[in-house]
Amino acid sequence: MRCARDWAWLGAFGALAAAAGGVHAQAYPAKPVRFLVGFAAGGATDVSARMLAQRLAESLGQPVVVENRPGSGGVIATEAVSKAPADGYTLLMMPAADAVQPALRRKLAYDLERDFAPVGRVVTGPWVVVVHPNVPARSIADLVALAAKSRDKLNYATSGIGSSAHIANELFNSMAGVKMVHVPYKGVSEGVTATAAGQTDVIFASITAAKPLLEARRVRPLAISTIKRTKLMPELPTVDESGVRGYDRSGWYGVLAPAGVSKDIVSRLNAAIAAAVNTPAMTEAFNRQGLEPGVMAPEEFGAFIRKEVTQNIRIVKEAGIPIEG
């Protein structure tokens, strides 16, 4: 049996260990933080990461360095973060496209649920559903009726096969019970320009890409893709309230850390991100990019990712989108 003095010693040791852990968490970060981006500099993911990094550095009191590792649809950067030390000094700016990769590839060197610690979703980017002015549809209900009547004759543009917008439109097809034909382009700007030129009929476009053409009345807006209306275009109804009940998709960006990062560090990062983005200046800056700030808690973001991955796998299978071996 242990004597009282032994138990007292063990208790004191445990208290010291807990205190040491607390000091360690309070000391974070003690050096610069790396923020990996899986796409080239100047793209939407990169711009969002740099906007966040600048303010995050002020919140954390340490530099936050954005490092671009483009290639393979963002997989290269995601894999690098999955293998990084679990100390909170290597983070990933995760776009919605990352949640599509498990549906498009049979083999990935990482698992989004097993190998990462969700820190928080940062912003969402609603899509605006627009049509060419010659398309006789002034609402989502009109579009659904037209697509049902002229099956396989209406087509829609996206920024590429397997892109987030491609998945969003195939979800729309499924939920509305219609079949519009996919026409992939190299980017959303090319796609919305094609719709304005009458080469395609419909596109789920980012607000920033669509806005100049909307102002020039070269395309007609029908609805917003998110479940709630956006203050960026408050006059537009949602797809959900326009008749396709439950429809809710958007572009989004969030932050991941390697699995095993302490909960204290994850909480510190989440709080710092919230402090960084929930300011009038940052809100305005994101709004100019067609994005709406809204920081999710780590657990909520984890559940959101699981839901998106599950939905994406189902949509890819139902739509027959090609899968890499």
Image (cartoon, rainbow, N blue to C red):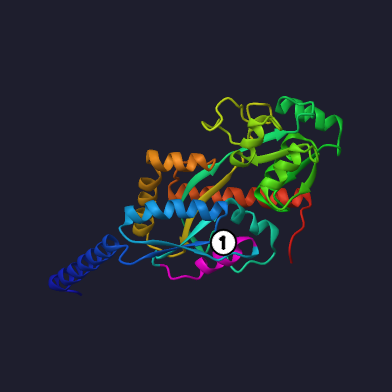
Q: Say which residue label 1 marks.
A: 38
Q: Check the image and name the residue furthest to the front.
A: 216
Q: Name the residue rendered at 63%, 42% in the picture.
A: 209
Crowding at dot 1, Cα within 10 Å, few <14 / some 14-19 / many 20+, comes out as: many
Quarter of the image with the N terminus is bottom left
Residue 280 rendering spot, x and y as whole percentages: 38, 38
The quadrant in which residue 102 appears is bottom right
Q: Does residue 85 belong to the magenta stretch?
A: yes
Q: Is residue 119 visible?
A: no
Q: Residue at x 75, y 52 (%)?
A: 317
Give residue 156's position: percent from left, percent from top: 76, 41
The residue segment tinted magenta is 73-86
* Residue 158: percent from left, percent from top: 71, 46
In this rendering, the answer to whether 143 lies above or below 118 is: above
Residue type at mark 1: give it.
Gly
The secondary element bearing badge 1 is classed as loop
Is 106 on the left-hand or right-hand side of 299?
right
Residue drawn at point x = 42 percent, y = 67 percent: 86
* Residue 185 sits above or below residue 64 on the image: above
Above-or-below relation of 102 to 197? below
Q: Is residue 95 covered in magenta? A: no
Which of these two is toward me, 275 or 172?
275
Residue 295 position within the rendered picture, expressed as x and y whole percent measured from the top left: 44, 45
